[in-house]
Amino acid sequence: MKNRIIHIVAGLFILISITLAVKVNINWLWFTAFVGVNLFQSGITKWCLMGTILGKLGVKD
C-alpha cells in the first residue's frame, strides 16, 4: 500500500509541475527534476522520505 501511494504522489507531482511549467513558468521543471532525483536516490539507497512519513502516519506496506 505504501509503495502504491508513493508512486501515485510522485506521478501527480510530476504531472502538476509539467502543467505549471507550460502554463505559468518554465522554472517549474526544476520541481520535476527534484522529484526525479528523489526517485533515483530512493532506488539506489532503498530509503524514501515519503515512505518514512507514510510509515509514521500509520500506512502499512
Image (cartoon, rainbow, N blue to C red):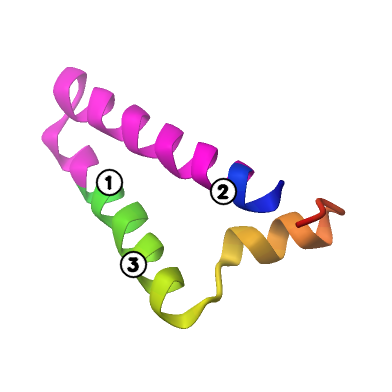
Work out whether mark 2 precedes mark 1 in sequence or the reverse, and give the earlier one.
2
The prevailing secondary structure element of the residues shown in magenta is helix
Q: Earlier in the sequence, mark 3 or mark 2?
A: 2
Residue drawn at (30%, 34%), measured in percent from left and top?
17
Percent x, y of residue 10 = 45, 44
Amino acid type, label 2:
Ile
54 vs 57, left or right, is: left
Query: Which residue is depicted at the point 60% across and 44% down?
Result: 4
Camera-side residue of 26 and 50: 50
Q: Quadrant of residue 52?
A: bottom right
Q: Position of residue 39 (x, y in %)?
A: 39, 61
The residue labelled by disc 3 is 40
Residue 44, given in percent of the width and then of the height, sits at: 39, 78
Front residue of 60/25: it is 60
- Residue 10 badge: none
For residue 47, what is the image quadrant? bottom right
Q: Residues within 10 Å of mark 1 (few under 14, many from 20)?
A: some
Q: Which residues are magenta?
A: 5-29
Give the CA distance from mark 2 to mark 1.
15 Å
Q: Position of residue 58 (x, y in %)?
A: 87, 54
17, above or below 19, in the image: below
3D distance between C-alphas at marks 3 and 2:
13 Å
Identified by mark 3, the residue type is: Phe
Q: Is residue 22 magenta?
A: yes
What residue does disc 2 label?
6
- Give the residue at mark 1: 32
